[in-house]
Amino acid sequence: MVSKKKKSDNRRTYLIVLWSLFAAFAVAVYLLFYGITKEWFGPMPSFEELENPKTNLATEIISADGKLLGTYYIENRSNISYDELPENLINALISIEDVRFYEHSGIDKRALFRVAFGVATGSSDKGGGSTLTQQLAKNLFPRGENLSTLQLVIRKFQEWVTATRLEYNYSKDEIIAMYLNTVFYGHNAYGIKKAAETFFSKEPSELTVEEAALLAGVVNAPTKFSPKRNPNNALARRNLVLKRMSENNCLSKHDYDSISQIPIDLSRFGILDHNSGQATYFREYLRGMMNEWAKTHYKADGTPYNIYKDGLRIYTTIDSRMQRYAEEAVREHLSKDLQPTFYRHWRGSKLAPFALDSQEDVDAVMTLSMKRSERYRVLRKAGMPYDSIVANFHKPVPMTVFSWDGPIDTVLTPWDSIHYYKFFLQSSLMSVDVRTGHVKAYVGGNDYRFFQYDHVTQAKRQVGSTFKPFLYSLAMQEGEYTPCTKVPNISYSIQLPDGKFWEPKDSGRTMFGEEVTLRWALAHSNNRISAYLMKRFGPQAVIQMARRMGVTSEIPAVPSICLGVCDISLYEMVGAMNTFANRGVYVKPIFVTKIEDKNGNVIETFKAEQIEALDEITAYKMIELMKGVVYEGTGIRLKFKYNLTNPIAGKTGTTQNQSDGWFMGITPDLVTGVWTGAEDRSVHFKTISLGQGSNMALPVWALYMQKVYADSTLNISKGDFTKPLTDIALDFDCDKYDEEQNATVTPEESEEDEF
């Protein structure tokens, strides 16, 4: 029998141990709370970190009409405030994750005892012990990987302390918002804002009860409960959330019964990445521009901005409606008209789609394309011999290829895939607001997922007759010429420095030997009259004119530039043509109006550079000249086929062998340029009737403007250009010369001269 003294000693020992453990625990918690245990237990978040928790925030690209075009991110996350959260989402989250959220101070003792009892008894229904605040602590300050059991226990204690400190520093509403902003929902969506966009293409405030319940349930296991990958699991999880909401009196029994029967609707699901959504080519161009900007702009701590982490908001000039119309116009013309015509045009040709003389020439082009491919670069870098690389390119592999009806999963050799892609014609478009220089629409190609070469700013192609307005501007600027000035339509030759003579040809002999007005000559893209003007002014003067109008590309000082033998980007050409509509003032096209930091503070604002390139009279003369292109020249199908009868100035362009087709269209509000052609210049139509700019590029412009004019919310005018206030006569009817000579002109007869 144990003596009373023995029992008393045991009890005293037990109490000492118990109180010692309690004291040790209290000391450990105290030290953890105040972050004094870094050497023993690892780092704890400081008060400064709790006040300003660091998360990777995506930079948002905002359109001029307030729409989200895309993001740049490491984690696709954008924060929102509690006020932007719908009540049904908050109720769903609390019901499924932490029903006593408003009762505890970061640690739910009842939940902990439930978990402990479940572990001790082996119960299958242990329940969760982590509160929302604890989960937030884990999200904000991740545990790390490969922790030992002891480290995991210590880390759990640290999370408890961090949760308590979060409760001390933030209100319950702020904690809910922070949690929803940090949690991962799967499919590249971090935070509730990106989740709502990804799953339902909505703002969080627009979520229905069933949508809110789905998103509240997904966070527990984003892959297991993904409605895209595991729809049955997702439906069961969503309905469990709805049931908990009903049990928590956030949803009536009747509403639960009806809503739980609603199927999950993912018709608007879309993963937000750089290959999808609107304006993909523009966003990629902007990415490079913003990375350069960030290198020279610094945050308060002295470090440069990072567009992938710092949650900037980039307000662009792009109008999402006009961007959509531009993308639709490119797709409509190429997929329904031009590409099918191109296939028929080359049907039966052994060398298709190459306009080359022999199979050897074709093989040379194909080999060069192989060497320029990413596959070749990777294999070469890995040290694979050339012969082995060639063999690799002739080995069939599974791949996904582009088609206008959607991506196709197939098996091809890489060599055959190169040949397959050679058939596709590309088109690009850029549209600019006349007065501000704001780029409203930007289409760099057919589909950025498959064709990542940007034909707006990256590509430079021969511009053909769209260069002629620079020459005519010089003539108008000198004062002695007007649109009605008459010049003999005869052959002109120019002596070159080597003593030889250059004499351009025209595809037709209409009006040959007669006097024609400059308006008629530009309207019909007459090469002889261009040679006459070039002989009169010389290449250097024309180049200087192009420079004043914003062209920075290299232009050779040779007479043939009057026919557009130089390579210029679409971006430069649109900016230059805008000078005519803007009364002689060149406005450098811009893409961004302002940049804000994550807190909404404006970091920088942007305005377009402006230079007076022409006098107002010259600019108006050029508008009148270029109206003739549309009224009776190579752009006449705008009126006959597309019923665009409002005042429009324009210029078509067709280059050697029809490799490039251009159309520059000018209205009082918008200047829009279109280029169409294949990526390889040896791929093109064999006839000028199919390959000229009026057939390849002009239809894209027409379809785009039809859609723009049909949208009354854009307020794009169909009115005429404003005539300058001057005593100089600016009524260029040329004694009705043009009307009399071209009364019988049809669209088929207005074929363009190539050089």
Image (cartoon, rainbow, N blue to C red):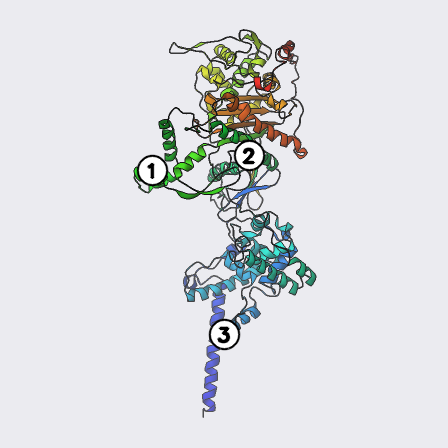
**Residue 612 lies in quadrant:** top right
Identified by mark 1, the residue type is: Val
**Mark 1 sits on what residue?**
390
Identified by mark 3, the residue type is: Ala
On the question of residue 702 being in view, the answer is: yes
Residue 250, image x, y percentages: 66, 61
Q: Nearer the viewer, residue 640 or 295?
A: 640
Q: Which mark is residue 587?
A: none
**Mark 2 sits on what residue?**
331
Earlier along the polypeptide chain: callout 3 or callout 2?
3
Please, is residue 317 above or below residue 190 in the view?
A: above
Please, is residue 485 above or below residue 362 in the view?
A: above
Q: Residue at x 58, y 44 (%)?
A: 600
Q: Nearer the viewer, residue 204 or 290?
A: 204
The label nearer to you, 3 versus 2, is 2
Earlier along the polypeptide chain: callout 2 or callout 1?
2
Q: Give the quarter of the figure containing the N terminus.
A: bottom left
Element carrying mark 1 = helix
The label nearer to you, 3 versus 1, is 1
**Mark 3 sits on what residue?**
120
